[in-house]
Image (tube, rainbow, N blue to C red):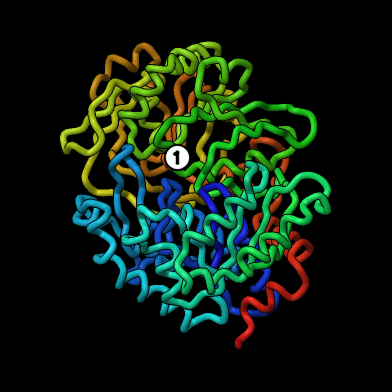
Amino acid sequence: MVLGTSSGASKSWLTTALCRHYARLGLKVAPFKAQTMSNNARLVAAPDGACSEIGGGQYVQALAARAEPDARMNPLLLKPGADIRSQVVLMGQVSEALSRMPWRERSEDVWSAITAALDALRAENDVVVIEGAGSPAEINLQANDVVNMRVARHAQARCLLVTDIDRGGAFAHLCGTWALLPPEEQALIRGFVLNRFRGDASLLAPGPQMLLDLTGVPVVATLPMWWQHGLPEEDGVLDDKTRASGAVTKTIAVIAIPRISHLDEFQPLRNVPGVRLVWARTPADCAGADWIVLPGSRATSADLAWLRAQGLDQAVAGHAAQGRAVLGICGGLQMLGEALIDTQGIDGNAPGLGLLPLVTAFEADKTMRHTQIRFGDLAGPWKALSGTEAAGYDIHQGRTAELVAQHPAMAAKGDVARAVLPGALGWQNAAGNVLGVYLHGLFEDPRVLHALFGASAPTLDSVFDGLADFVQTHFEPDVLEALIRKD
């Protein structure tokens, strides 16, 4: 099990690396995270042939483990829609009852599903690599824990505790976290990991030995800082690193709305040579961008209100008025339309940005499906996508329709939306520079990257192998094998 002294310590990254490391040993491996709080959801097959949702991190970890992604790998997914409200997804399906239940009352209702999923994965695999959440030493939450040490005790997992040394205070974080655990949980901690270290590792002495003297736990790895490993930041952290590989030929500004969803789908753009990705929170962040992207949202109307409050609506409108490329994905597509209509109390009513003559009406039912598509004839900056085949996934609430069907007079002005994807999945404005699509994951398809950039990003499989090489190089000899060796 991989635990962290805090969020952002790289638990997800290390779990993914270990999944590939053990899979390369010829073992049958599965990832597991009891509870994830993230709007980066992926679709997996459900037993009834429909689709289930799991966290994007566990989906990627399953691929690293060379396993079929499965709802059991992430039995509880919390999708924040507001600061104090989340949609609860249990075993891949939305639970309205759990979503209404106070958090502290929820733990016992979900624990049996969590343990059943974990036990089934343990029975079917040689190794299960478990990821914790936040910190195991959050003493205000320990009584209701379903993701950290309660899981570790249930599985008697051999635990690594990782910390981000770049933040400073790493030895105190490790020692303090260990000290706040009861003795039976301290005994499960088999090694400390110092992550994101810059400089000469010999300068760490005598810290590791002093830490061993205090806790009895060795430092088993010091991992150097590695900016461009190729994976999305864990849980979709907006990391503000705007490096590009080689000379910058295209700058893409993604609007960093508060309830952004499926943020991990933009990682391939960061891996394309010459592309600079910027997370835009102010109009100034959009200046000089070649594209502006409005991403998916878990609260479209609220995020649209935030966008207006920052003046980003004018930045997007001005960019479009200059004939420059604008892309809306899912919730971003809905924002580009004329209006959001909510008669179900799901998301809220709001005027849209008016860049596509579309109207979205929110509905109670959620669309969840994997989709293979072929783009129709596109114009303007998106012309390169014409005829391109791609695979993606669709997770959204709401039905979007062309406004011209309600107001034929608009056609006389040329203010129409051209359908560019079948099944009401995508539209383009008459000028050709504004494109809206419902499909997530397009940039993960090499055919789309090649059409748009004439280039490719490293495959996920090569990224996983690079992660496994990295941990194998920097962990102390025999540590990784000892963690799975039968006593």
Whether residue 359 sits left or right of residue 272 in the image: it is: left
At 36% from the left and 18% from the top, the residue drawn is 354
Q: Quadrant of residue 92?
A: bottom left
Horizontal and vertical percent for residue 460?
65, 56
Query: In the rendered image of this protein, does residue 247 appear above or below residue 126?
Result: above
Horizontal and vertical percent for residue 310?
43, 17
Residue 407 visible somewhere in the drawing: yes
Residue 51 visible somewhere in the drawing: no
Please name whichever residue, 268 or 174, is drawn nearer the observer in this view of the structure. Answer: 174
Amino acid type for the residue under numbered disc 1: Leu
Under tag 1, what secondary structure?
strand
Horizontal and vertical percent for residue 226?
72, 47
Horizontal and vertical percent for residue 266?
57, 41
Count of numbered circles on the image: 1
Which residue lies under the disc numbered 1? Answer: 421
Query: In the rendered image of this protein, does residue 139 appear above or below residue 153?
Result: above
Whether residue 174 sits left or right of residue 117 in the image: it is: right
Please name whichever residue, 434 or 167, is drawn nearer the observer in this view of the structure. Answer: 167
At 73% from the left and 57% from the top, the residue drawn is 222
Q: Quadrant of the N terminus?
A: bottom right
Please name whichever residue, 390 or 240, is drawn nearer the observer in this view of the structure. Answer: 240
Whether residue 307 sits left or right of residue 246 in the image: it is: left
At 59% from the left and 56% from the top, the residue drawn is 174
